[in-house]
Image (cartoon, helix red, strand yellow):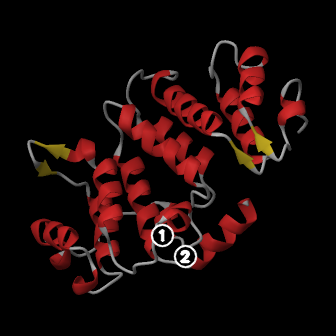
Amino acid sequence: MSDGRFSFPACVIAGKRRLDVDDLLMLRKHAFSDGIRTEEDVHLLLAIHRACDSSCTEWDCYLVESIAAYAVHGQKPRGWLDEANAEWLIATLSVNGVVATSLELEILLHALDIASSAPECLSAFMLDQMRLGLNRNAGSAYSLSRPNSHPGVDIDDLHYLWRVLRSACDNGRLTLSPRERDVLVAIDAMAEPRVHHAGWNALADTLQLRLATPHPGPRAPWLRASPDALLDSAHQAA
């Protein structure tokens, strides 16, 4: 695919209106008989997926599980994510700090689920997707997948939050890096406490988020971008 064209069987599958089980079986037999083993395999799988309008549940599961497994178990170090692999995942699945589709967001979440540990750059990035989602003009996957347009943190947001920060919990205590804390402070500031879920307010009080000041260190590019710039980038990626 180095010249921008698909080889067989990708050329037969790419561009279909809907990816079905037969397409998945063909691809696994002829293109990925040994599974997803290289970064090129990942980019090919994503290119096929992005070239089609919709996909079946089996395809979606294969996409999520295969790419997450490659990121965590197919690269060194095995079983966990170092900063280089986490940054590769972020770069592969986002444009200027925005994850544009719910499946690509799920790949990142699943990688966090199966990794024994992950660097703060990934968890902070995932928390920032939540911040973008609460900004209804951000055009991110998180925003589009929220079941409602509630302006504050709700129960579904809390479930996402705990999924991202699972590894930060030690004997019931949540330990945050300055970068993660910065994002949570920004999320809290997006609405008045009365608008947020009671569970979020309890967390904010425990972590003293409303007394916190932003960490003075350098911020990642995706934290420096404005929501309007991110919206334009997401539309260009689509």
**Coordinates of residue 146 in the picture (x, y in percent):** 47, 66
Label 2: few (<14), some (14–19) or many (≥20) C-alpha neighbours in 10 Å:
many
Relative to 145, say whether 34 is above or below: above
Q: Amino acid at mark 1?
A: Leu
Q: How far apart are the two marked residues, 1 and 2, measured between alpha carbons?
A: 7 Å
In the picture of the structure, the residue carrying the numbered disc 1 is 132
Q: Residue at x 77, y 39 (%)?
A: 48
**Coordinates of residue 212 in the picture (x, y in percent):** 19, 74
In the picture of the structure, the residue carrying the numbered disc 2 is 227
Where, quadrant-wise, is the N terminus in this rendering? Answer: top right
Element at label 2: helix
Residue 200 vs residue 41: left or right?
A: left
In the rendering, which numbered label is found on residue 143?
Answer: none
State whether residue 219 appears in this view. no
| Of the pair 169 and 91, the residue shown nearer to us | 169
**Coordinates of residue 13 in the picture (x, y in percent):** 84, 34
Residue 31 vs residue 174: left or right?
A: right
Callout in the foreground (1, 2)? 1
| Of the pair 52 and 45, the residue shown nearer to us | 52
Task: Give the mark nearer the N terminus: 1 vs 2.
Answer: 1
Q: Residue furthest top?
A: 34
**Coordinates of residue 6 in the picture (x, y in percent):** 88, 32
Q: Residue at x 66, y 32 (%)?
A: 42
| Of the pair 229 and 56, the residue shown nearer to us | 56
Where, quadrant-wise, is the C terminus in this rendering? Answer: bottom right
Total numbered labels: 2
Relative to 60, say whether 99 is above or below: below
